[in-house]
Amino acid sequence: MVKKKVVKARREVTKRQLSQWQLQERRQRVLIGAGIFVILVVLGVIGIGLYQRWYIAEYKPMHETVITVNDTSFNMSYYINALKYYGQGVSLQDTQQIYTLTGAVVTIIEENELIKQGALSLGISVSNQEVDNELRNLGLPLSESFRDFIRTEMLVTRLLDEHFEQQVPLSDEQRHIMAMFLESDIQAYEARARLENDESFADLAGELSLDSFSQENKGDLDWQLEEILAELLDTSVVGEYAFSSDAGVLSQPVYDEDKTKSVGYWLIKVLDRRWDPDEAHIRAILLSSEEQAQTVRTRLETGEDFATLAQELSQHDTSRENGGDLSWVAPNTMSPIINEFIFDTELELSQPLRDEDVETRGGYWLMMVMDIDDNREIEEEDRDSLKTKAFNEWVSSLWDNPENEIDDSYLDYEKKEWAIWKATEG
């Protein structure tokens, strides 16, 4: 028997129920929307905070101008890249080196810009393509700061090869000269007498000269231009003599008051000693020659004041203003020759103590012009030296030009410290 399918009566939804459901749905949507809004607000606040922190801590300081050269400005990011580029090889553990670098890089940035602007006024430039090719060859980033660094290096080469090359002659007046540098007039006169008795200039210069270049070359300075002589010997005295004298004439001793040499003579006076701890209170005078030291010692023995003579004559800058007073010194804190006198003798005033670990000024040249050529070809190495000298003088003129305005006052100690940290992080 077939059961009849029971059809349930459809439940009718009243208007009141429909209204309640719709209201509940709206409430849910409002709550969900409000929750999303709150989340978005929170995320927005966090995002704004992070953005502000990033902007204040990173973006803003990186983009602040720290150096200006005329109308060109450089920001902190550029300075940090310059620290990385020019600081290659500097030990991060050497604090002194690092902080010396911070100042040096400021000068480099300023000088580079002066060179770029100066080269432009001379009609000399380097194209962007040339710079980018060099950056790729060197494996460096194609950033504006690294472009600048390489561009300046390429400009310097071009300036030397194209502009300053034209300022250096191919030939000029030169002298072939022999020279030796001696500590005193007495020694110089003795050496001159030996030369007049046919001793070898080369042998004597190799034995006695206190100038490293003339000593290494046994007195033979070869053919030289006057300005090259001044660079090689760090004095103008030899060149001035050579280019005003005849060939074949041995000079009298010629005094050079500014030439330095690696030797000096100490006079040490022990004022007091004590043994616990082992120390001595001393005064010192550093003199240029043994003869001068002996003369000053004689003056001390006849009663002249040590402090007065030290202030007048000593070449020891540290103690001169204090009348030679070095206060209390411990063993092995002075040079061995001084230490031996202070702690191994009972004498109060030393004989002249020769010390080859100090530098003193003054001495005497013996010279002889071997040959003269008024138009000798200049060697390539000397021409390069003359070009570099001319370039350096040109750069100095850019620095000295009052029309060039440079400002790096913003880059104070704290900014440099931050830059070092950013340059070395990671």
Image (cartoon, helix red, strand yellow):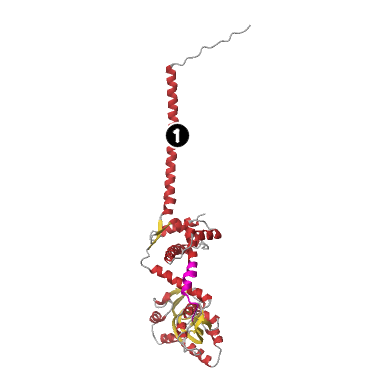
168 within the magenta span: yes
Q: How many marks?
A: 1
Residue at image coords 40%, 56%: 65
Q: Nearer the viewer, residue 403 or 347?
A: 403
Q: Secondary structure at mark 1?
A: helix
**Residue 26: % across, % down:** 43, 26
Q: Nearer the viewer, residue 369 or 327?
A: 369
Q: Main secondary structure of the magenta part?
A: helix
Residue at image coords 53%, 61%: 134
The region drawn magenta spans 156-172
Q: Residue furthest top?
A: 1
Q: Residue furthest bottom?
A: 197
Circle 1 sits on which residue? 36
Observer able to see residue 188: yes
As drawn, is 205 to the left or to the right of 51?
Answer: right
Q: Residue furthest right?
A: 1
Q: Nearer the viewer, residue 171 or 339?
A: 171
Residue at image coords 42%, 49%: 55
**Residue 401: % across, % down:** 37, 68
82 within the magenta span: no
Observer able to see residue 276: no
**Residue 201: % across, % down:** 54, 87
Would you identify the image quadrant in which residue 392 lies?
bottom left
Would you identify the image quadrant in which residue 106 lies?
bottom left
Where's the N terminus, which quadrant? Answer: top right
**Residue 102: % across, % down:** 45, 62
8 shown above or below 33: above
150 shown above or below 175: above
Q: Residues within 10 Å of mark 1 (few under 14, many from 20)?
A: few
Q: For the residue marked with disc 1, what is the amino acid? A: Ile
As drawn, is 357 to the left or to the right of 415?
Answer: right
